[in-house]
Amino acid sequence: MGVKIDLLGAPRRYIRDVGARRISKEESRRLALKFDQEYFDGPREHGYGGYYYDGRWVAVARRAIEHWRLKPGDWVLDIGCAKGFFVKDLRDSLPGLNVIGIDISDYALKNAHSDAKPFLLRASCDALPFADNSFAAVFAINTIHNLPLDGCRRALCEIERVGPGRGFVQVDAYRTELERAVFLEWMLTAKTFDTPEGWLQTFKAAGYTGDYSWTILECDQNIRL
Ligand SMILES: C[S@@+](CC[C@H](N)C(=O)[O-])C[C@H]1O[C@@H](n2cnc3c(N)ncnc32)[C@H](O)[C@@H]1O
């Protein structure tokens, strides 16, 4: 089994104004699940509220290069790469690193950063079009929990297959009933969410031996359970 690492920055708190999504949440979910323009660049209640390159992945890329001891010539995969910002920053941070991004969103791939676009392709995390043991590191940040549990298991097996012991998955989790309630209020696309202990069991059952972290939402106001 791998280790928990705070690849996105430590310790990170995700505080959300859950009230902003209380209205028309079902409609927002319906739109978000298309992973189309509304999700990436529509209003905040439907997703990102505008996802533009701002350099936030540079620090993550540097931590990843150090943690996985990546070197020029290595191959790296970003699963659920969206507009390719992490792909761009990995490539820029280590010239000679080969980075591929995959996503199921035609919109994100079409509107990806021009520096990353040539290295992105459309594929699903539960059926990776790559040979066994192809990658020195495989990242799936806030992506596999968008599948139902059986799809998550397939995705974990796939990550392990293409980068044995060299994966990193970050998934939605909660530790308390309050965190679970905040999560249920805020989330739009996740189909699988669990406690950290529950996720660890899922990893083990899938034979996943890479590293991991949790996205745990907190609330910026009092909500009633
Ligand atoms: C919350 S975003 C995360 C994007 C990026 N990894 C990040 O952390 O900013 C989830 C991404 O997963 C993609 N996605 C959803 N289902 C997927 C699937 N089955 N296979 C690959 N990507 C998927 C979405 O299109 C979206 O770009």
Image: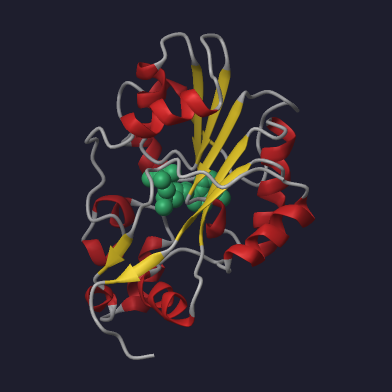
Residue 17 at x, y percent in the picture = 24, 71
Q: Is residue 16 above or below residue 4?
A: below
* Res. 87 in view: no
Identify the residue shown where x is 35% and y is 35%: 110
* Drawn side of residue 63 relative to residue 199, left or right: left
* Res. 130 in view: yes
**Toward the viewer: 21 or 138?**
138
Query: Which quadrant holds residue 51?
Result: top left
Q: Residue furthest bottom?
A: 224
Identify the residue shown where x is 54% and y is 66%: 191
Identify the residue shown where x is 62% and y is 23%: 136
Query: Which quadrant holds residue 158?
Result: top right
Residue 92 at x, y percent in the picture = 35, 17
Residue 69 at x, y percent in the picture = 55, 20
* Quarter of the image with the C terminus in it: bottom left
* Quarter of the image with the N terminus in it: top right
Q: Is residue 176 above or below residue 158?
A: below
* Drawn side of residue 177 relative to residue 192, left or right: left
Identify the residue shown where x is 52% and y is 28%: 67
* Drawn side of residue 114 relative to residue 147, left or right: left
**Toward the viewer: 193 or 112?**
193
Residue 138 at x, y percent in the picture = 58, 33
Query: Which quadrant holds residue 90?
Result: top left
Q: Is residue 31 above or below residue 77?
A: below
